Structure formats: structure tokens, C-alpha cells
Image (cartoon, helix red, strand yellow):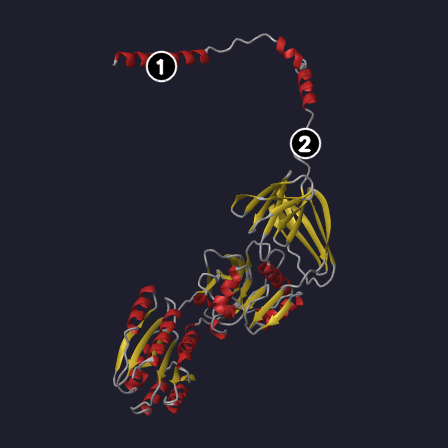
Amino acid sequence: MRLFAPVEVEGRALLEGPAGTRAYRLRVEGERRLLYTFPLTEAAQVKAVAEGGWGRSEDRVELRPQDQVRALVLGDEALAALLRAQGFSVEEGPFRLPLEADLVVVGLGVLDLPEGAARALKDYLEAGGGVLFTAQAVFGGWDRALPEHLPLKPKKAEGAAVVLILDTSGSMRGEKLALAVEGALRLVEAASAEDRLGVIAFSSEARWVFRPRPMTPQGKKEAESLLRSLGAGGGTVLGPAYREAVLALSELPGRRAILVLSDGEVSDPKEPILEEARRAGFPTSTLALGQDADKAFLKALAEAGGGAYLEVLEARLLPRLLLAEGERVFREEGKRGRFPVRPLSHPLTEGFSFPPVGVRFPARAEPWAEVLLLSQGDPLLALGERGEGRVAALATELSLWRFEEVGGFVGGLARYLSARRTLRVEVQGNRVLVQGRLEAPRLLAAGVEQPLLPVGQDRYEGVLEGEGVILDGKRRIPVRTLASEYPPLDGRKVLAQMAEESGGRLLAPSELGALPKVQSSLREPLLWLALFLFLLERFVHYRLGV
């Protein structure tokens, strides 16, 4: 429902339909919209009534369902259930190409989906698709996989610290070391400026590749250069490297973790290393690379350190698994409690009362994004446009945020995102103004097509008398112009009336010749005379040779 008042007025509004009756008391100045959402599975009628100082206005509209909006939901059962209740055709995973849905809901981290998923989502969005990232996805590495396409990014109050202990013994020479370095580089990329990362190389002895340092742009550049200089050779002595890592992390605050990667039999005493892991106070995770790795010891080290143990049988999987372990440490945890929600002015938030959320993830909005919901000063929901498509990100868990109107709100958001092109039509007299991303819009009237002329960025204009149709690809949008603001008048009658009211009379064309001649101005003859004298002077100078 759209209300407009040039000056501030008080009024009442009533909306009736399949979702029940909603009554509002409100102040209107300028434009105000009220959103009324419900699942449209069969023909339905909605009644709107507005009352105020202007009087009473009433309208009814009948809606019929067209093709259902298709949604592919990846990893968010709660949201899939809400969309089904709103009349969407919902498919839940797995991720497969091509992406043929109208809307893709991403509730998984980037590492939970196959290689190439990030690129496919980027292409799908820019081609006109709709994408909704829920909280686990927003904080699951997509800010690095799609840095220019995510409207919300994690905001960390305090970073994490990780030390990677990397086996560079002789058995790691060649492809193994190259893939281990690639995995370490992915760790560098995954870390934010608040995180600290360090790398120790161990073979017959231990040496710092670089000590734990903030992963600022400069820090990342230096770390990358140092990692690419690594070589392999020597034995497999882990103890000194492990003790160095524990000592370095003990001096740092916040979340901390050690990652150990090895492909061979550890040659030094193992019990002191296990005891050190039990006393460390932060987790140690281990990765056993290949069949010859000291699997029994690495598994015992992970258990003693309270971390995870992974067997990497194929070296090509190493970079992805290293990144997954780093993401687990670097990922910011959600805050639990009771956090109030403040909606900002937008058609999608009009008419809804949002209760507090039980969990939120601290986030910041990108400059190009439009924030719709705030909680304690941080954005909770933001959306924007990328290419031809629309994208939104939510920094709370929908499964824990239950309120009476949540289905209608989510349904409205999903339909907004799945609309592939926005189109706005305005009529001003006999002019038709169209705004939106269109290919080659045309205006069809009385069997004749004419192109709509571009008059600005994504703005087109045409002239229409009466009824017609706007054509854009397969879309057909009926349009009708209003009566002209300045209707054509009989010019002779207007002149006759002007003459009568001014005490004169209307002259016939035959009388114009009898009018006395008005003396013309001397300005034009004098100009011609001046030009003649100038040319004469130039001619005389030429003949005299001066």
C-alpha cells in the first residue's frame, strides 16, 4: 500500500486479505509504503482503506499466482521451511551446475561447497540471479572468496593467533612442499588484519620463517615472500619447533592454536612433546600427509592438545584442508543474549515489528550496501546490487529468531532478491517514463512499435496517447496515459475572447494589408552602410599599396 501527502497529515490505514486484517495509525509526509505479505497459492483479494484529513479512499486488488519462485537452499533447513510456507518451490542442495533457480540461499561456508562454487555464484549473481547469505555463510570465508559481492563482512573485536609448524625434511621435497606452501599461503589470505600468523619450519633443526605478526596488507606481502623461499632437506625433529610455538603463543592474548603438518616419522623423544601439548592451554591440530607419516604420534598429539587430527592421503588436498583448519580458528563466534533490533526505513521493513535476536555476529556493511536492520549499532541485514542481480546477507540465525511475522518478512525479502530486473513506470500527461535495467525497451500502441528513448542512466521515455504496452524481452507491461494536463483549445475562440475582454476586436486576415506601415528601425541600414565603408577603405589601401 502506497500513501503520499505533500504535507504532514495524520491518518488511518486498513489492509485486509488472506493474512488477516492489519490496522495502522500513522503520520504521512511525502511517500510511505505499507507491506502486506502472504503465501499466494490460489486467487486472492486484498482490500486497502485509507482515511484522514483528505477524506476516505478505498481500493481492491485481485492476485493470481503465476509460476512459483524457485529457490535452491544450501545448508539452512529453517529458512527452507519458511520459504515453503510462503509458496516458494524449494530444493535443498546439493550444489550443482548450472544454477537454474531464481534465488540461491547460502547457509554454508565456502569450504563446505565444492571447488568452483564461489566463481559460479559470482557469475549467477551478476547475470541477474538473487543470492541470500545467512549467518554461517557470512562468517564462513565468503568475505574472502567473494570480497566484492558480500554486503556484510565480519567485524572482529579481537583476532586469533595461529602458528603453523611445517615439516621441511628431505621427504617433503618437490610436490609435497609446493602444496604445503600453497596451503600456508591460503592461511595467510584467510587471516584478517586483527589475526596473527607465524610459521616455523622444522627438519633436523627448527627455524622461524616468520614470527606471529598481524596479517595486515604489508604483513601478508612479507609472509608470502618468505614462504615462497622455503626449501626441503634434513631429518624430522619436531620437539624444538613445538616448544618455540608454545612459547610464542603463550605471550599473546585471545584465541590461539597450533597446526602441525608432517609426512614422516618423528625422530626425537615424543613424550615431552605430548606433555607440552597438555600444558599449553590452547589446541593443537595435526595433519598427517601421506602413507609414511607418523600417524599414531600425530593422532596422539592432537588428542593431548585438544585439537583435530586429519589424514591427508593425497597431497593435492592439502591446501584446502589447511585453509579449513585456519578458518576454524580465525572464524568469529556469534554473541548470545537478547539484542534489540531496529529497522531502517525501507519497503521490506514497513509494517513489521522485530523482536530482539538471541544471537548475532558482529559485522560491518560495505559502502555500496543498504542496511535494513541494525542491532546495537551493527548491521543485522544488508542488501545491494551486483551486476544485474541482488544480494543480501543476514548476521543472525533465523532458526533462533522466531516471531509471528517472520515468514512474511523472509518471503518479501526472498521475492525482492529473486526479481531479476527492477522496473518502474511513471506517467506524466502523455509521456511514459521507465526506469530500470532494460535491454531494448519498446512501446507498442495501436499496433505500432516505437523504441523508448534513453534520457539518462537506466531511464527511458516515450509518448503515448491512451493505452499501450511496454515490451522488454518477454515481459509485457500494460500502461495508460492520463488526460493531457494542457488539453488542446480552439485558437480562434481564445483570440476572440481576448479581444472582447480587452475592448478590441478580432481582425480578419484580409484586414492586415490595410494596417498603417510602422516605421522600421534605422539600425539595420546603418549596419550595412558601416560594412560598405569598411570594405571600401580596404580596397583603397590595396590600390595605393599601403
Q: Position of residue 543 (x, y in %)?
A: 28, 12
Quarter of the figure that contains the C terminus: top left
Residue found 27% across the figure and 77% down from its top: 208
Q: Quadrant of residue 242?
A: bottom left
Report if residue 226 is visible in the image.
yes
Which element is circle 1 on? helix
Q: Position of residue 96 (x, y in %)?
A: 55, 72
Report if residue 373 is visible in the image.
no
Residue type at mark 2: give it.
Pro
Q: Nearer the viewer, residue 532 or 421?
A: 532
Q: Determine which residue is flagged by label 2.
A: 487
Q: Quadrant of residue 545?
A: top left
Q: Determine which residue is flagged by label 1.
A: 535
Q: Is residue 243 above or below residue 186?
A: below
Which element is circle 2 on? loop
Of pointers 2 and 1, the one earlier in the residue sequence: 2
Q: Residues within 10 Å of mark 1 (few under 14, many from 20)?
A: few
Q: Nearer the viewer, residue 124 or 298?
A: 124
Q: Nearer the viewer, residue 252 or 422?
A: 422
* Disc 2 from disc 1: Cα separation: 55 Å
Q: Position of residue 275 (x, y in %)?
A: 34, 89
Task: Specify whether 125 is left or right of 226.
Answer: right
Question: Which residue is the extreme one toward the front?
Answer: 543
Residue type at mark 1: give it.
Leu
Q: Position of residue 492 (x, y in %)?
A: 69, 21
Query: Tag count in the figure?
Result: 2
In the rendered structure, find residue 237 and report the number of the disc placed on it: none
Residue found 63% across the figure and 56% down from its top: 351
Residue found 55% across the figure and 52% down from its top: 437
